[in-house]
Image (spheres, rainbow, N blue to C red):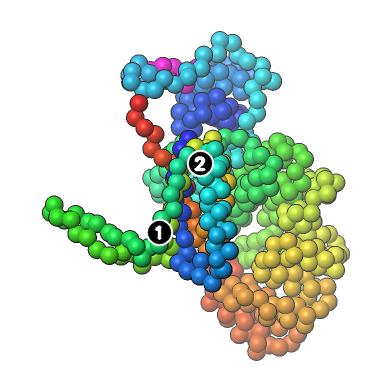
Amino acid sequence: MEYALLIYEKPGAYEGLSDDERRALVAEYWALRDDPRVIAGAGLRPVETATTVRVHDGDALVTDGPFADTKEVFGGWYVVQAEDIDAAIEIAARCPAARLGGSVEVRPVVEPRL
Amino acid sequence: MLDQVFRDEWGRVLASLVGFLGDFELAEEATQEAFAAAAERWPRDGMPDRPGAWLTTTARNRAVDQLRRRRTLAAKTPLLEIPEPVEHEPDDTTIPDERLQLIFMCCHPALATEAQVALTLRALGGLTTEEIAHAFLVAPETMKRRLSRAKTKIKAAGIPFRIPPDHLLPDRLAAVLAVVYLIFNEGYGGRVDLATEAIRLGRALSGLMPDEPEVHGLVALMLSQHARHRARFSGEDLVLLQDQDRSLWDTSQIEESRGLLDRALALHGRGPYVLQAAIASLQIQEPVDWPQIVALYDQLVRLTGSPVVDLNRAVAVAQAGSPTAALDIIDGLPLDNYPYLHSTRAELLRRLGRTDEARAAYHRALELTPRVAERRFLHGRITALE
């Protein structure tokens, strides 16, 4: 089965970390890509760089940033090919965000139509 | 008679079907059909020699029929592997007991606790949706939705039908035991049928996992509490352990409980359920060895870090002869909204002759207790202070 791992970070989780510590965390995310079960993924730039688009009556309304005032910010995702949810959970638990006050949502991906 | 066979076989047949088909919903439908066929035929033709094998075979064949019909109906569906129907009744010995796989699936942490509880009662206990709804005081429609959401999630999210691998087993077993104990405690609040159901589930688990001390510990704990349920109330009044009429205790359950506790201890079990069972076992002996109980509570507090357990430890400390030390423990606990903290404080203050403080503490407990029997008990205590 395919699962999306949606990574939510606690805002400010990286504050106060040294450059080395940050690099180590980034390396952990890259290392996850080496797991053959991880078939796609991307990390996102900080939420300050985000732009939101909504369409009203055919017009695109563009605004700065996400409006939502959330405790967690979407920071990146993986798609994994895993035998079952336990395997997906195991990979999710290795995402640094999960232990740094954030969370990882595990969602089955809709199977492509044959 | 038929009912009993049905209740005993339901979980086994359903588990075998889920294992066979890999689909909970279809397995449940087929199992239900097989049981309906049995209800119709057995009274007329007599019960087969191996009712379990008959039910499993019938259910499998119904499921295979169903899969064939679905394939004909929807030629475009991706080709499912359709298993072959079973020609002969297999031996009981050739049908593996897959109830453990089923219970680990039902109690998977990806399901909400209330769904785990409902699903376990449905799948392993064979209770109907209506019975479960009734036991938890929710509308049958609500329970139906809850169960159906859980089954959908099992399929969509890939919740596995298997005994968890070693590195996951301790956590997952703890989740299973928590569900069983939750069911038991629902029953202990007055609905005896659920307590009995939890004990049935526990006994089955204990047979399926003979090497897990915590399973025996949990069953021992439930039995030692259940053995006393008839003595816990006098009319509508709550009766404390030391005032209970021992002739109302169920001695066979107490004995079974001791046997299971011994087994758990022989397996070097020192987990939370084994410790609680050991405490419960000591509490019903005469005279009660309170210092030993305090020692067990010390271990339990270290293991669980739970302030509620610490409150119980305080009670044991008081019983062992140090009410002042017990009060010190209680006053350090972050349980200000917990009624039993205040009723326990009140008892200790009363014993120490600090009547005014005791009265205030009883009143605080009353403010926090909705249960009628307990309120009556507290009112009685306050009156006795005057």
Point out the stretch of residues depicted in magenta: B61-69
Task: Please indicate whether residue B14 sits to the left or right of residue B350 in the image.
Answer: left
Residue B187 location (% of width, % of height): 59, 52
- Residue at 60% x, 40% y is B104
B246 vs B298, nearest the viewer: B298
The image quarter containing residue B286 is: bottom right
In whole angstroms, how far apart are the C-alphas of marks 2 and 1?
A: 20 Å
- Name the side, left or right, on which B328 lies relative to B157: right
B364 relative to B137, above or below: below
Question: Residue at the location (44% across, 53% down)?
Answer: A43
In the displayed structure, B273 sits above or below B95; it is: below
Quadrant for the C terminus of chain B, please: bottom right
Residue at the image point whose x is 48% and y is 19% from the top: B81
Query: What number is the disc on residue B70?
Result: none
| Residue beneath the point at 60% across and 14% down | B89
Question: Which label is found at residue A38?
Answer: 2
Spot occupied by residue B38 in the image (x, y as percentages of width and height): 52, 21
Quarter of the image that includes the N terminus of chain B:
top right
Q: Mark 2 falls within which chain?
A: A
| Crowd rating for badge 1 (residues with CA inside 10 Å; few <14, some 14–19, many 20+) | few
Mark earlier in primary sequence (2, 1): 2
Q: Position of residue B217 (x, y in %)?
A: 75, 50
Residue B221, magenta (yes or no): no
Q: Do residues under tags 2 and 1 come within 8 Å of each other at their CB atoms?
A: no
Kindly identify the amino acid type of the residue bearing the numbered disc 1. Arg
Q: Nearer the viewer, residue B71 or A79?
A: A79
Q: Secondary structure at mark 2?
A: strand
Q: Secondary structure at mark 1?
A: loop
Q: Which residue is mark 1?
A: A45
